Amino acid sequence: MTSTTRLTVAQALVRFLAVQYTERDGVRQRLIGATWGIFGHGNVAGLGQALVEYADDMPFHQGRNEQSMVHAAVGYARHSNRLSTHAVTTSIGPGATNLVTGAALATINHIPVLLLPGDIFATRVADPVLQQLEVPYAGDVSVNDCLRPVSRYFDRITRPEALIPAALQAMRVLTDPVETGAVTLALPQDVQAEAYDWPDEFFAERTWTVRRPGVDPTEHAEAVQAIMSAEKPLVIAGGGVHHSRAEEALAEFAAATGIPVASTQAGKGSLRHDHPQDVGGVGHTGTATANELARQADLVIGVGTRYTDFTTASNTLFTGDGVRFLNLNIAPFDGHKLAGMPLVADARSGLQELTEALQMHGHRVTDTYVGEYTLDKERWEQRVDACYEAEEIDVRPTQPQVLGALDALVDESDVIINAAGSLPGDLHKLWRARSKDQYHLEYGYSCMGYEIPAAIGVKLAAPERNVWALVGDGTYLMMPTEIVTAVQEGIAIKMLLIQNHGYASIGGLSESVGGERFGTAYRYPSDDGTYTGAPLPVDLAANAASLGMRVLRAKTVRDLRAALAEARAADTPTCVYVETQTADTVSGPPPAQAWWDVPVAETATRPSAVKARELYERHVSTRRRPL
C-alpha cells in the first residue's frame, strides 16, 4: 500500500519544490532556490501559510512590486546559468496581471521562472469574488489567462490531484534548454487550502538533467565544409553561448581558426574584450569593426543567437555577395532562421566538434584577413579611449565618461546590469567585458525597470560579487521600489543613477525619424504644447535616500571617480547619483554603425519628417531577404 501524507495543496507544492534539483556536467544544484511573494486574498491563506509552515525548507523574499519580483528571479536564474531559479507568488487580480510584463521578459529571453498567482474559487461558491473579471461567454476565464501567451507552460490547478502532473510538467519545462521561460501554475484560492492525501513519492528528491545534445553527422559535415569554403567568415555570438557555458569552447574555436567573433547584446562577454578574435558588438548598436566585417562576410556563423532586428540591422547588414548563414543553435526554430544551414545542438558541444574537425583539416583563415580585422579592432579601441577620456575633471561628465570612470575601476569580478534607454547602445559599443558573466544586458525585451530588481537577484546568486545596476532617470522612475527589499535584507547592490532629464535614447530616435523629440524630455510644457520648458525639479537622489539607500552625489568627473570607488567598497546598498551633460563630438559615443527600421511617416508637412522619410527610403532599399 502506498504511504501518504495529508497536506494542503499549497503545503504539498512548497514541499515538492524544495526537493527539485538540476544537474549538468556532473554539477547538481537546487532548482527553486527561493520564493518571492506579495500576499493578498488570493494566496495569503494558501501559499502564505505553507511558506510559514515550511520556512526551513523554502527561503522567502518579500517583494514590493509583482513585476519586479519576476525581474529579480530572472536575474538570479540568468546568473545561475538557468540551472536554478526562483518562484513568485501573488494574489489574484492586479497582483497576478502585474506578472505579465515580467513573464514576457523571461520567456523572450529564454530564462526559467516559476509563477504562482492566486486565482478565483474553483468551486464558484463565492462568485464573483473581489477583483474577479467576469467573462459572459466563458465561466472558466480569469485574469490569469493573460499569462497564457507569455508563458512556456500554463495550467490551472482546479483539483488537488491535478497538482501532481502539472508540477512535473512545470519542472520539465523549467529545465528544458529549448522550451524554458516563464511557467505559470494558477492556483484557485480555495484549492490552495484544500487538504489531500499525497503519495510520499511526490516529495522524494528529483534530479532533472539539463541535456547537451550533440550535432547530427550530416549537418556537421555540411557545416565543416561551409566553413572551410569561406574566405571571410564571421561568428555572431548570442546569449546561447552563455546559457551553454560555451565561452571557453568559443575561445578555442576562434583561436584555432582565426575567425573573428562579434556579439549580440546577450552574447557580449562570450570572449574577453582583449581576446585577439573579439571584434565587439554587432548590429545597430555595434562597433564599426564588427559591422564592416558583417558587410563583407561570405559566411555568418550564428552561435546561440535569435537574429533580432538590432543584430541584423533590420536585414540591411549582411550584404556580401552570396552570403550564407550557418546557425549553431539548440532550438531548431532559431537554427533555420535567415534560410540558414541548421546545426541543431548545444553550443558547447557543437563548437567542440567543429573545432576538432577543422583542426584535423588544418583549416585557418588567411593571415591577410586576420591582419585586416586586427588593425580595425585597434582603431576602434582608440575611439573607445577617446570617448572615455575626460580632459577636464572638474566638470560634469558625459555619459560615456561615466562609463569610462566605471571601466577604470572594476575588475573581472564585477557585474554590470542594464536593460533600456541610451545606456545599452553605449555599453554594447564601448564596454570592455572582462569575464564571461560581467556584462548582464536584458535586451530581448529591453524592459525599463529591470535593473534594480535584477541586481538583487544576481547578488543573491553571487553574494561575493560587486553588482552594479546602471539606471537612467526614466528607468528609475519606472520601478525603484525594490530598493526597500535590498535595504531590508542587507543586499549590498551598487546603483549608478544617471540623470539626463528624460528618455535620451527614444528622444534621439524621435529626432531621427521626424518626431522632433516630442514627449521625450522630462520638462515643463511650453505654450506650443511641446515639453521644452525648464527641467522638472525632481531629486532622484533624495528619493533613493528616502527608500533607505545610502546615496553619494557626484557633480564632476573627479567626484564621480571618488564616489564610485567608495560605493564599490561599501557593504550596504549604495547609490552613486550623477547628472550628465550633453556629449560633444569628441567625448560622445560614436553614432550608430548600422541602421534600424523604425517606419517614418509616409506623408507629412513638417520639414523634419519629410527629410527623415527620404533617408528612410534610402535605407529600406538596401534590405535583403535571405532565401
Image (spheres, helix red, strand yellow):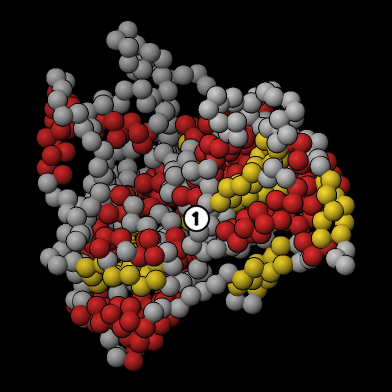
List x then y, in percent, for residue 538: 52, 21
- The residue depicted at 17 percent of the width and 32 percent of the height is 612
List x then y, in percent, for residue 421: 41, 39
- The residue depicted at 27 percent of the width and 86 percent of the height is 363
Q: Name the foreground residue: 171 vs 450.
A: 171
Q: Secondary structure at mark 1?
A: loop
Q: Which residue was labeled with disc 1?
A: 110
User: In the orientation shown, which residue stands out farthest toward the top?
Assistant: 527
- The residue depicted at 19 percent of the width and 69 percent of the height is 298
Residue 385 appears left or right of 550: left
Task: Work out whether 195 lies above or below 474.
Answer: below
Quadrant housing residue 79: bottom right
List x then y, in percent, for residue 508: 30, 34
For the C terminus, the quadrant is bottom left
For the N terminus, the quadrant is bottom right
- The residue depicted at 23 percent of the width and 36 percent of the height is 599
**Which amino acid, mark 1?**
His
Residue 24 appears left or right of 332: right
Can see residue 222? yes
List x then y, in percent, for residue 11: 81, 49
Q: Name the foreground residue: 572 vs 53.
A: 53
Callout 1 environment at 10 Å: few (<14), some (14 to 19), or many (20+)?
many
Task: Work out whether 324 lies above or below 311.
Answer: below
Task: Work out whether 188 lies above or below 462.
Answer: above
Can see residue 386? no
Residue 253 appears left or right of 407: left
Q: How many marks?
A: 1
